Image (tube, helix red, strand yellow):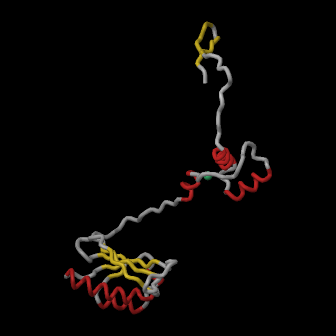
Amino acid sequence: MMKGVMTGGSTYRLVGSVVVGGAVAEVSESDSTALWHMRMGHIGGHELNELYKTGLLGGMKNCNMDFCKFCMMRKQSKMSFKTGLHTTKGLLDYVHYDVRGPIREQSLGRSRYFVLFIDDYSKNVWVYFLRQKSEVFEKFKIWKAEVENQIGRKVKYLRSDNDTKYTDGKFVKFCEEHGIQRH
Ligand SMILES: [Zn+2]
């Protein structure tokens, strides 16, 4: 970029000097690969390699590219949280539970699932390992008896976002009998 000084009329005189020997702009090999990756609409590594083999991608010496931050950003997903309609006033008023798994490596006790009980008020989390998803109900009963005894309050609401997968009739009936409302 050069600067010009108006000398009269619409004539500009460029302010600059002659560089002897020439200037060299260097582009690293990974930069040129990244450039082609972007030029081709953020093409995948495999496809880029196929094109590279044709020799049509000028200036590209190899197909090694550092990770592309734009591709990373595109792959991230945003999830919105629904506004909760409950107000929790005390311990065990509102309890969330969530079953996760199967996990790739089973635990020492040969469990591949776990359930989390989360107290909405304190955000306290209890974890129990499960061999089968269907063990949720048994673990819930154990957990409920223990925390109610220790805290001196009762579980009032129970919430799960993917409830139907592992809720059997016995679990529902148990909640009804103990006055626990399910959300
Ligand atoms: Zn990309």
The residue nearer to you, when weighing 181 against 18, is: 18
Residue at the outermost front position: 21
The residue nearer to you, when weighing 90 against 21, is: 21
Q: Residue 125: name its quadrant.
A: bottom left
Residue at the outermost left position: 152
The residue nearer to you, when weighing 85 against 61, is: 61
Q: Is residue 70 left or right of residue 101?
A: right
Residue 73 place in picture, x, y as percent: 54, 54
The residue that appears at 46% across and 86% down in the rendered structure is 110
Image position of 182 with respect to 122: above or below: below
The residue that appears at 23% across and 71% down in the rendered structure is 89
The residue that appears at 63% across and 8% down in the rendered structure is 9
* The C terminus: image quadrant: bottom left
Q: Residue 178: name its quadrant.
A: bottom left
Residue 50 place in picture, x, y as percent: 75, 56
* The N terminus: image quadrant: top right
Q: Is residue 109 left or right of residue 64?
A: left
Residue 94 place in picture, x, y as percent: 30, 75
The residue that appears at 30% across and 91% down in the rendered structure is 177
Q: Is residue 14 left or right of residue 50?
A: left
